[in-house]
Image (cartoon, rainbow, N blue to C red):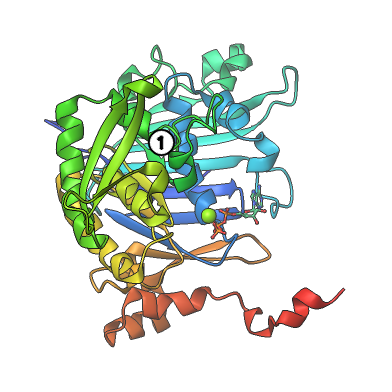
């Protein structure tokens, strides 16, 4: 079982403000034997390649997959992932329970509102499906669900589903399910936006890579679409030289295909029009990023938002995120390799987690808890300067072109 944190007070229940993730704990999840993150409004994850940044975000996506329409525990483990054996940490010595625990609060460091704990493993008897080892829900300090219960013991197959995913069983804590269902993961791939039709097929659930981005835009009311695109245009004209207008159109001649349309200032009096397939990678990623940041909703998981962007823009991203967060209320989790993104002096060491791969699985450390990082931050260095050098792979200095030429 995941250890309980120090006692916290029960939050007032009247007219509840939005929830956020106050703490995430993992055991035996992918490349983490153990991880414990106290989360604020922004969480920055840094670490070398393959240190587990995406795996950590995936734990939150996993919870979302349990509660979403058409989802559920079995879907989250085998439908949308490759089964329990791919989720269980390979560094674990036996085959222990995989555990995920989230604490939900209304404000960073605020009193605990909900705690949800889930332990999963494979059933030893037929049907050999993944099943719950425990499922617990706490409202504040009060335990209100504690499985397995007598009904589960009488009918163990029940343990192949969580109560969280079942409307009939989650009435007392549906707020948790509703909240987890608002988690959104975004890792836009410009080529998919550009060539959506060429990548036909069922697509990936929830469209994290943006293939259906334009179709989603088409499905919105014109008023909402226009107003959002106008805001994005205001920002884009400052970030992308010569860009003067961002529009949306539906091409009836093509049978109703949605398009983004951009005007570039040009020697021609009315400028040059271009559609999404002509836009640069960075322009498309900025449009997608601004769109996600402007959307109201639950936690937003952003994978390497710096990709394809100019360093001067990247240096402004964290500030932009903060401003937009005040409006959207979204908590933001960011995986990044970018010292530029972390160069913003508004980013604190307490918001940044360093993922350090080790033989016993990746260790997660809050940057502000490392004395040498704290000293650098106090001396006026940015998180990017103080933390990023610590994420260099230890043997990298030995890498030479000979390595690639040796037979
Ligand atoms: N069950 C597991 N046990 C141990 N390691 C695992 C498990 N599942 C995946 N991994 C490892 O996790 C690593 C990938 O982690 P992840 O994709 O989260 O890294 P990342 O930090 O996002 O890297 P990048 O910066 O390259 O995107 C791979 O090395 C993979 O082998
Ligand atoms: Mg990754």
Q: Which residue appears farthest toward the right when viewing the image? A: 407
Q: Secondary structure at mark 1?
A: strand
Q: Quadrant of the C terminus?
A: bottom right
Q: Residue 313: x, y in percent?
A: 29, 65
Q: Is residue 390 left or right of residue 374?
A: right
Give the side of residue 146 with respect to residue 120, left or right.
left
Percent coordinates x, y for residue 211 in the rendering? 45, 35
**How far across and down, in percent of the image, does residue 255 sit?**
39, 19
Residue pictured at 33% horizontal, 34% vertical = 259
Q: Can the viewer see residue 209?
A: no
Dot 1 crowding, Cα within 10 Å, few <14, some 14–19, many 20+:
many
**Would you place residue 357 above or below residue 281 in this image?**
below
Residue 67: name its quadrant.
top left
Of 156 and 48, which appears nearest the observer? 48
Q: Is residue 226 in view?
A: yes
Q: Point out the residue furthest to the front here.
A: 268
- Which residue is found at the position 42% from the left and 32% from the top? 212
Res 167 → quadrant: top left
Which one is in front, 177 or 194?
194
Q: Is residue 201 left or right of residue 338?
A: right
Which residue is disc 1 drawn over?
116
Q: Residue furthest left?
A: 15
Q: Residue at coordinates 75% horizontally, 17% vertically from top-left?
A: 126
Position of residue 274 relative to residue 235, above or below, is: above
Report whether the residue tagged 1 is closer than 8 Å to ligand 1: no
Count of numbered marks: 1
In front of the other: 350 or 248: 248
Residue 67 placement, left or right of 29: left
Q: Position of residue 351 (x, y in %)?
A: 33, 63
Depicted 59 relative to depicted 363: above or below:
above
Residue at 23 percent of width and 57 percent of height = 266
């Amino acid at each position: 079982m995941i250890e309980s944190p120090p006692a916290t007070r029960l939050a007032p229940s009247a007219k509840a403000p939005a929830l956020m993730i106050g703490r995430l704990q993992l055991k035996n999840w992918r490349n983490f034997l153990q991880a414990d993150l106290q989360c604020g409004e922004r969480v920055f994850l840094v670490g070398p390649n393959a240190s587990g940044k995406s795996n950590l975000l995936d734990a939150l996506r996993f919870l979302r997959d349990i509660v979403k329409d058409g989802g559920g525990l079995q879907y989250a483990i085998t439908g949308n992932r490759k089964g329990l054996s791919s989720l269980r940490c390979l560094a674990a010595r036996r085959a222990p329970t995989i555990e995920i625990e989230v604490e939900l609060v209304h404000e960073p460091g605020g009193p605990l509102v909900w705690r949800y704990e889930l332990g999963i493993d494979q059933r030893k008897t037929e049907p050999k499906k993944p099943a719950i080892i425990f499922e617990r829900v706490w409202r504040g300090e009060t335990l209100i669900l504690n499985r397995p219960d007598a009904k589960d013991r009488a009918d163990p197959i029940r343990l192949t589903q969580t109560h969280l995913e079942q409307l009939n069983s989650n009435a007392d804590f549906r707020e948790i399910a509703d909240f987890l269902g608002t988690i959104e993961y975004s890792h836009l791939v410009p080529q998919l936006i550009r060539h959506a039709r060429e990548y036909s097929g069922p697509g990936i659930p929830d469209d994290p890579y943006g293939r259906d981005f334009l179709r989603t835009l088409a499905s919105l009311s014109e008023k909402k679409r226009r107003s959002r695109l106008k805001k994005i245009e205001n920002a884009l004209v400052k970030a992308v030289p010569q860009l003067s207008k961002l529009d949306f159109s539906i091409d009836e001649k093509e049978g109703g295909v949605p398009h983004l349309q951009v005007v570039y200032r040009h020697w021609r009096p009315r400028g040059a029009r271009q559609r999404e397939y002509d836009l640069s990678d960075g322009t498309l990623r900025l449009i997608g990023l601004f769109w996600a940041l402007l959307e109201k909703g639950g936690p937003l998981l952003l994978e390497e938002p710096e990709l394809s962007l100019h360093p001067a823009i990247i240096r402004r991203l964290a500030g932009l995120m903060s401003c937009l967060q005040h409006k959207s209320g979204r908590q933001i989790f960011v995986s990044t390799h970018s010292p530029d993104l972390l160069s913003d002096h508004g980013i604190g060491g307490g918001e940044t987690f360093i993922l350090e791969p080790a033989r016993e699985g990746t260790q997660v450390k809050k940057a502000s808890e490392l004395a040498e990082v704290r000293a650098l931050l106090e001396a006026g260095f940015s998180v990017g300067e103080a933390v990023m050098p610590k994420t260099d792979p230890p043997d990298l200095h030995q890498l030479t072109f000979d390595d690639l030429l040796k037979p």
